[in-house]
Amino acid sequence: MVFPGLDRRDSAATPGSVPGAAAAPTVLLLHAHPDDETLATGGLMARLVADGARVVLVTGTRGERGEVVPGPLKHLEGTPELAATRVFELAAAMRELGVIDHRFLGEVDARAEGLAPRSYLDSGMQWAPSGMAEAAADAPADALSLAPFDEVVADVLAVVAELRPQVIVSYDERGGYGHPDHVRMHDAAVAAVAAVAALGSVAALALVAAEAAAAVGAAVAAVPPFALPNETRIDLYTVIPDSAEAEDTDIVVPLGPYRDAKFRALAAHRTQLSVEGDEIVLSGGQRHAVSDAEVFRLYAGSEDSEPGHPAAESP
């Protein structure tokens, strides 16, 4: 398996499963907008599916404020139809990657018990003087980055309680390039893993998620993250940007035989990018070569839970 933690099958067992039966290892990916998952983790997702893992994608928003590439779909930019189109594009991309379980945060299957379903909206972004992205000045009131953090965490915990994943994958602490929705999903991932640590059991999360925001916030604040026994630990891996300095313990996942699947999934996101050879072209005309590998790093603090996670380059 790609990640060492996927060898740990116990936390994936679900209520009612056959005693002693080996459950498929589960990986939960937390992304912010449609297309983020393919750009950052498309090869990983296809590889995990081929390896027999259960792969579940939770997307925070529908990318309502995304810019649209020049061409026949440009008229969708800034309209309500863009969100519906991006939902369709995401479904097409998931088919190319073989992922059959995708959810939007706040919907019934990714919502804390007792809370009415909701949609988290794209916060939009603007470039800060630092060169990093920041929230748009006119971010809507229902934006993901402005939603109560404890509510976002409670929704993530509801999914974690159901799936009992061994591994969660999300962005690094900067959200890659600073987009506030990326940062919010990273922070929610960290808080969810910390809540598991606080409770000592993934099964107990169902109770916490149902009791709503204040209880979740207290649980997260009560203990250091990742102070978790091995049998209930969830490993958090973050996406490492191409520009980041490599570390010996990074998990390098070559696209290899999954390269074509990733490119087909990229092409499905027609409003957001164009595929030209080995490059993608974004709405502003920026060209980016698609790397031959995706790189992930065990989140700082997780190492203390299980020393000796080896560096790996998955064949």
Image: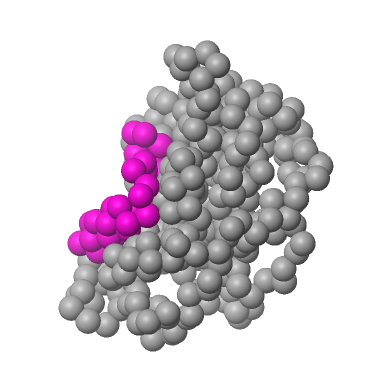
Seen in the picture, residue 276 relative to 271 is either above or below; the reply is below
Which stretch did the figure color magenta?
81-110
| Residue drawn at the location 53% of the way across and 35% of the way down | 25
In-image side of 122 versus 172 (left or right): left
Expressed as whole percent of the image width and height from the top left, the position of residue 88 reads: 24, 56
Q: How many marks?
A: 0
Q: Of 64 and 295, which appears nearest the observer?
A: 295
| Residue 34 in magenta stretch | no
| Residue drawn at the location 31% of the way across and 69% of the way down | 267
Expressed as whole percent of the image width and height from the top left, the position of residue 218 reads: 66, 31
Q: Of 117 and 242, which appears nearest the observer?
A: 242
Q: Is residue 170 visible?
A: yes
Q: Is residue 172 visible?
A: no
Q: Quadrant of residue 177?
A: bottom right
| Residue drawn at the location 72% of the way across and 30% of the way down | 230
In-image side of 110 versus 13 (left or right): left
In-image side of 167 versus 69 (left or right): right
Seen in the picture, residue 276 relative to 170 is either above or below; the reply is below
What is the quadrant of the N terminus in the image? top right
Expressed as whole percent of the image width and height from the top left, the position of residue 91 reads: 28, 53
Seen in the picture, residue 102 relative to 133 is either above or below; the reply is above
Seen in the picture, residue 235 relative to 203 is either above or below; the reply is below
Expressed as whole percent of the image width and height from the top left, the position of residue 68 reads: 30, 74
Q: Quadrant of residue 84?
A: bottom left
What is the quadrant of the C terminus in the image? bottom right
| Residue 96 in magenta stretch | yes
In-image side of 129 versus 307 (left or right): left
| Residue drawn at the location 52% of the way across and 77% of the way down | 127
Q: Of 225 and 116, which appears nearest the observer?
A: 225
| Predominant SS of the magenta segment | helix
